[in-house]
Image (tube, rainbow, N blue to C red):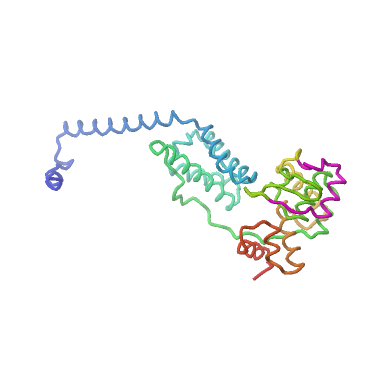
């Protein structure tokens, strides 16, 4: 029957003018109905609430930098949408491409643009799963994503430079830096740290971490007069990182350090220091809290320490 219907169905050229008008009305009515239904579905979506839920889902990694990156990327998308009078949830692929072209014209680095587009695509995929009839991911398959750029060689501060940096920092931040530099902790673990005796307990990337505080860290904490049990409870990870960055840039301008280091470079310095002490990759892996030895090998290879 299907074959018969397909064979006997008229072509548009076979229809009279009145038939064409009737068919056009049917097509237009169908499209209007579909559009009306989609608009109703979109109107029921609380964008701000969905964005908060998405960020909270991302935040399960316990990484403030991940949340900051995702929030910043979505804020840029929202700013672009306001400037060009675009409804975010109704974006078409060409508009997704235009967003990429605009932020590239503004001078954002290619790798940063790729990150922004990946976040936007991830958000739309999240929304598409929750509202499949209303939202489609316009970033899927985009050709506007710039090619990857080679990541510049990692430059790690020497411990002489780290001591120079700590000498100009506020004492509480210098103490936090000492913990990162001499215990290898990520900045996100610092505000969560609890200390009992010389033992610390904290959490990083969803995992509990404990160990003995390095003597250098103990000295800095005592010198800062911090509350011993929760020494960094008043300082957020963002505050620590931003303060560190500000002072390091100033020192770089004064030619007192070689580069504009970030707090994560302190962890790099610690990894290299421990590895050079005995070339014991298993000890490095344990102290860094890596999931397995392969992660540590990749980490040290990226720092130029292993082949």
Asked whether, in this view, residue 67 is left or right of residue 195, the answer is left
**Does 53 lie within the magenta span?**
no
Measured as percent of width and height from the top left, residue 223 is found at 88, 46
Which is nearer the eye, 103 or 186? 186
Look at 85% across and 44% down and name the residue there.
224
Quarter of the image where the C terminus is located:
bottom right
| Residue at the far bottom in the pictured view | 307
Measured as percent of width and height from the top left, residue 2 is found at 15, 46
Quarter occupied by residue 285: bottom right
What is the magenta range?
209-232
| Residue at the far front in the pictured view | 197
Residue 250 position (above or below residue 17):
below
Which is nearer the eye, 303 or 202? 202
Quarter occupied by residue 233: top right
Quarter of the image where the N terminus is located:
top left
Measured as percent of width and height from the top left, residue 277 is found at 77, 67
Residue 184 position (above or below residue 169):
below
Look at 60% across and 51% down and name the residue there.
109
Look at 75% across and 69% down and name the residue there.
278
Which is nearer the eye, 41 or 79? 41
- The number of numbered discs placed on residues in the rendered structure image is 0
Measured as percent of width and height from the top left, residue 161 is found at 81, 57
Residue 248 position (above or below residue 56):
below
Residue 47 position (above or below residue 210):
above
């Amino acid at each position: 029957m299907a074959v018969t219907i397909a064979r006997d169905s008229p072509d548009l050229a076979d229809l009279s003018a009145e038939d064409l008008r009737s068919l056009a009305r049917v097509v237009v009515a169908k499209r209007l109905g579909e559009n009306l239904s989609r608009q109703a579905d979109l109107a029921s979506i609380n964008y701000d609430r969905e964005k908060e839920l998405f960020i909270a889902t991302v935040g399960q990694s316990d990484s403030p930098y991940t949340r900051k990156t995702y929030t910043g990327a979505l804020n840029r998308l929202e700013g672009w949408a306001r400037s060009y009078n675009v409804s975010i949830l109704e974006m078409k692929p060409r508009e997704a491409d235009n967003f990429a072209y605009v932020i590239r014209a503004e001078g954002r680095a290619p790798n940063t643009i790729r990150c922004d587009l990946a976040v936007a695509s991830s958000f739309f995929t999240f929304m598409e799963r929750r509202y499949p009839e209303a939202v489609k991911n316009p970033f899927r398959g985009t050709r506007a994503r710039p090619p990857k750029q080679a990541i510049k060689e990692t430059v790690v501060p020497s411990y002489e430079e780290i001591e120079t940096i700590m000498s100009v920092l506020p004492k509480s931040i210098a103490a936090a830096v000492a913990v990162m530099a001499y215990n290898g902790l990520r900045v996100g673990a610092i505000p969560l740290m609890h200390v009992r005796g010389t033992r610390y307990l904290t959490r990083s990337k969803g995992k509990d971490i404990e160990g003995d505080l390095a003597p250098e860290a103990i000295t800095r904490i005592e010198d800062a007069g911090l509350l011993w049990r929760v020494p960094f409870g008043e300082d957020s990870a963002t505050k620590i990182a931003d303060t560190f960055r500000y002072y390091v840039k100033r020192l770089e301008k004064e030619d007192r350090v070689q580069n504009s280091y970030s707090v994560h470079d302190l962890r790099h310095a610690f990894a290299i220091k421990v590895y050079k002490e005995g070339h014991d990759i298993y000890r490095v892996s344990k102290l860094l809290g890596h999931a397995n030895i392969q992660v540590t090998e990749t980490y040290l290879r990226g720092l130029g320490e292993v082949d």
